[in-house]
Image (cartoon, rainbow, N blue to C red):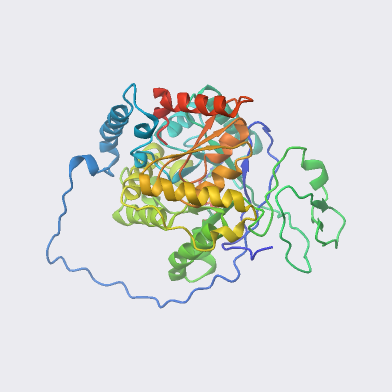
Amino acid sequence: MAQALATRSIHSSLASLSSGSLHSRVEKIRTSDLASKTSARKPRKSHKLFRVTATRSASEVVPVSPEDVQKTEEEQMQLLRGIMQPGDTPASMWSKPTVRRKTKIVCTIGPSTNTREMIWKLAEEGMNVARLNMSHGDHSSHQKVIDLVKEYNAQSKDNVIAIMLDTKGPEVRSGDLPQPIALESGQEFTFTIRRGVGTADCVSVNYDDFVNDVEVGDMLLVDGGMMSFVAMVARGDLGAELPIEEVPLLQEEIIRICRSMGKAVIVATNMLESMIVHPTPTRAEVSDIAIAVREGADAVMLSGETAHGKFPLKAVKVMHTVALRTEATLVGGETPSNLGQAFKNHMSEMFAFHATMMSNTLGTSIVVFTRTGFMAILQSHYRPSGTIFAFTNEKRIQQRLALYQGVCPIYMEFSDDAEGTFANALALLQCSLCWHCKY
Ligand SMILES: Nc1ncnc2c1ncn2[C@@H]1O[C@H](COP(=O)(O)OP(=O)(O)OP(=O)(O)O)[C@@H](O)[C@H]1O
Ligand SMILES: CC(=O)C(=O)O
């Protein structure tokens, strides 16, 4: 199995709402092997010699201050409505793909936000993933949030929120393996509570209740990166365990490695820390979000800002507008060089690669049909410049896809006839409701 990535142990999982279960699905990420060298620089005194200002045409600018956002989003909707005139051809319909934010927003839910009203408002402001930190609160409060998100998803026609459980405390660990294992998609693999087992198709886990806690249909996130779904640049722990000046370098490195492995990556901690108590961000915080977006993170995360902060909705608005504005400056097409090596399915790789090329060249969006989510996730890792409209006939998959960069997941029944499915998808895209799904 590929070298494990980065940070300290984190246990995070994307839970399927349909399971409604709080059983942990474990991802373990290690710190080793990511040391980068740098020299710490002394902060330089700033001299205010002259002021440089830049102007842009109004239509290009996505302002950062929360107060400005309402107007701007309305302007964006007008732009979308302009694009979506009745009778538009599909080609024109798929143009201007960058008005939809591609980098996803993870919000930690806590006392400031664990009500029905706040979950709804967070979702409307742009939350894509609700994170529950299992180190805080209790199971019943987390269950309540899960139920609320479930309710939101059930009644929302055009938006879906994923749930991430960040499980800490006692770790469930797999036993040692004599050598790395490369698992194939669809391959059977056994976890046993017998100790000391480590073969190509069976490994022990150190937790005896594993067999009782895991249910049929549960998703297990496992040590080592390739089998896991999500990595997190947990800058809180990184900064505590390593010299602080290493953190930005590690962040860049972790994102790069994750992207080359085709693995989703979230940048977490202190992104808008000052907004826990202040209604506006610092310039440095805004730059921090922009950097994570440019580096190609799938998602940026809010912790205390939304869990116990005074301005959770404003924090999401700022994240949304900064990400959107930054994305508008990015030119598509920088695909990690060894991305294809992460997967064995050459045909899928070829489709993803060429769809990306077309999207980047023609400035169009991409439509993907996916039952398992695989193709949409693969497509996302290529980071095409256009939005990936991912149609799936599985609500759980739709929900899971909410995390991935550039993916707009849409639930739709598939018909037996491929042409019919395609026509239905186009009809759905043409339906103006769909365009309200701007996150
Ligand atoms: N479910 C919750 N109930 C009560 N407080 C919470 C909850 N979730 C988060 N918080 C509060 O928000 C703060 C920030 O959340 P965060 O998830 O970053 O936790 P943390 O303990 O600071 O860091 P870590 O992510 O390393 O566990 C927490 O320290 C806690 O005070
Ligand atoms: C998110 C987290 O756990 C950290 O930054 O350490």
Q: Which x, y percent locates residue 138?
A: 63, 39
Q: Residue at x 78, y 42 (%)?
A: 213
Horizontally, residue 355 falls left or right of residue 28, namely left
Q: Which x, y percent locates residue 34?
A: 55, 70
Q: Is residue 151 above or below residue 402?
A: above
Residue sitting nearer the eye, 177 or 315? 177
Name of the residue lying farthest toward the right: 194
Name of the residue lying farthest toward the left: 50
Q: Is residue 378 above or below residue 250?
A: above
Q: Residue at x 62, y 59 (%)?
A: 29
Q: Quadrant of the C terminus?
A: top left
Horizontally, residue 143 falls left or right of residue 306, namely right
Residue sitting nearer the eye, 351 or 368? 351
Q: Is residue 34 visible?
A: yes
Image quadrant of residue 46? bottom left
Q: Which x, y percent locates residue 106?
A: 49, 44
Q: Residue at x 58, y 39 (%)?
A: 400
Q: Residue at x 70, y 47 (%)?
A: 220
Residue sitting nearer the eye, 383 or 242? 383
Q: Is residue 109 visible?
A: no
Q: Which x, y percent locates residue 207?
A: 79, 52
Q: Is residue 348 above or below residue 156?
A: below
Image quadrant of residue 8? bottom right
